[in-house]
Image (cartoon, rainbow, N blue to C red):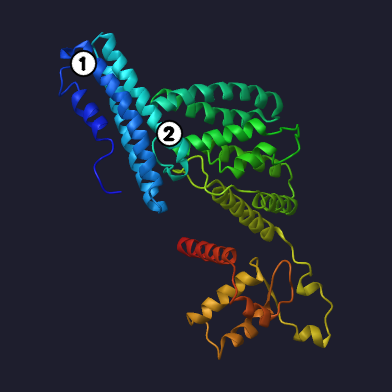
Amino acid sequence: MCGRYTLEWLDSLITVSLNPEKTDLTTLSDEEIRTVISKISEEKEKLLTILKNQIFGLTKEKQIALLVNQSHSSLIILLDQVLKYQKEQKSNKSCLKGLYNTLISSLEELLSFIETRFFAYLSLNERVPVTYLAVTGKELKQRVDRLKTKLLDQETNRELADIVLSSLYCFINRLKEDFPVTFRELLYQKDLLKELELLELPQCETCIFTPLDELLISLNFNSKSYMAYFTKRLAERLNANENIADKLERLLFHYKQFNQMHRKPGVILNPQYGDLKTELSNWFAQEVFYLEKRLHLTVVPISGSAEQKPSGTASQKNEPQKLLCILSVDQMALLLRAADDLKIVTARSLNAVFKTIVPHLSTPYQENISYDSMRSKSYTAETRDKEIAIQTLEQMIKKIKEY
């Protein structure tokens, strides 16, 4: 890999000889310009051969990737420089215009060679050449225009179709305004467009997750507009049912459906935003927690009060009075274990703490709790139970501060 700079002649020509700040191009004769044009064509062919020999002469993947990316980056920089000169040139000499066109064409051919033959070694964070974007933008615009008719005709929910189309048109407009675009961004948009063109869109007004939803979720379409639309549509469907228990059951069912959806690895619409599945999973978890809290607060104990029970039997006299707790067995287990570890309550052992306190506790779903089972669960806590226990304590702290 060691040796002289492969693009040395082209680099010197563009950055020095054709640089208006260093060379007065108006002094060049037509004959001199034609000589340079001829030399550019010769140099291009020579560079193609050199690049092939250099790349195929390497055996290590890292060395090949390094050489490919270095050559590609240098060519993009040189191409941008020539495009700038062409845009700013004031001379009307036809030969000079021909020189720029030949140089641009040669640089594009060299870039195309690398991108076609050695694409697997290119960094996806590499910026796409401006001229390539201009051509690609026109092609994408035509395809999105055709897709627009298909989406709006077949997709039941126009709002979702508008979100997807707006995202595609927004990207195309970026290309027109010469914003820098990486290969990763361009490939994502092409992949999305290809999948949308192949997608079958059956009419299904009752489906909560349409085929279009499944596609967007699989491609990590983390548009803020889509996430807001997704949660709003699901909330509206759930809120149509006033029964909290039914609402929670339906939410958990949709949560399970969502978690089972396929996800294509390594893709994302906007790397600056959060991952789509992570963000929506957090929303589901918070909604489940909220509904569980509401359900627990509205539950009435199955058994009546002590005054309503028949009295006089020995078993009833010995039965401890129970306190109803809205927390689950697992969540109470965490609180009791923490209280023992911090010596807020003291006993001969942790087992004694559970044996003394648990018989006096019940939950809306379980009147008689095994103290031994609760003690065992304090060692195998799930993340969600920890979060609920912490939130409960935070609410208690807030309440104490208000006293």
Decide: few, some or many residues near mark 2? Use Cα within 10 Å; few <14, some 14-19, many ≥20.
some
Q: Looking at the picture, does residue 260 appear above or below residue 17? A: below
Residue occupying image coordinates x 75% and y 33%: 202
The circle drawn on residue 32 is 1
Q: CA distance from mark 2 to mark 1?
A: 29 Å
Horizontal side of residue 328 vs 311, given as left or right: left
Q: Looking at the picture, does residue 161 appear above or below residue 396? A: above
Residue under numbered circle 2: 113
Label 2 sits on a secondary structure element that is helix
Residue occupying image coordinates x 72% and y 66%: 364
Q: Is residue 139 visible?
A: yes
Q: Residue type at mark 1: give it.
A: Glu
Nearer to us of marks 2 and 1 is: 1
Instruction: Pinpoint residue 322: horizontal percent, then vertical percent.
Output: 70, 76
Instruction: Pinpoint residue 268: horizontal percent, then vertical percent.
Output: 51, 43
Q: Looking at the picture, does residue 30 appear above or below residue 292? A: above
Q: Residue type at mark 2: give it.
A: Phe
Label 1 sits on a secondary structure element that is helix
Residue occupying image coordinates x 52% and y 34%: 189
Corner quadrant of residue 334: bottom right
The circle drawn on residue 220 is none
Whichever of callouts 2 and 1 sits on the residue coming sooner in the sequence is: 1
Instruction: Pinpoint residue 104: horizontal percent, then vertical percent.
Output: 34, 23
Q: Looking at the picture, does residue 135 appear above or below residue 2? A: above
Viewer-closest of 309 and 273:
273
| The furthest residue to the bottom | 348
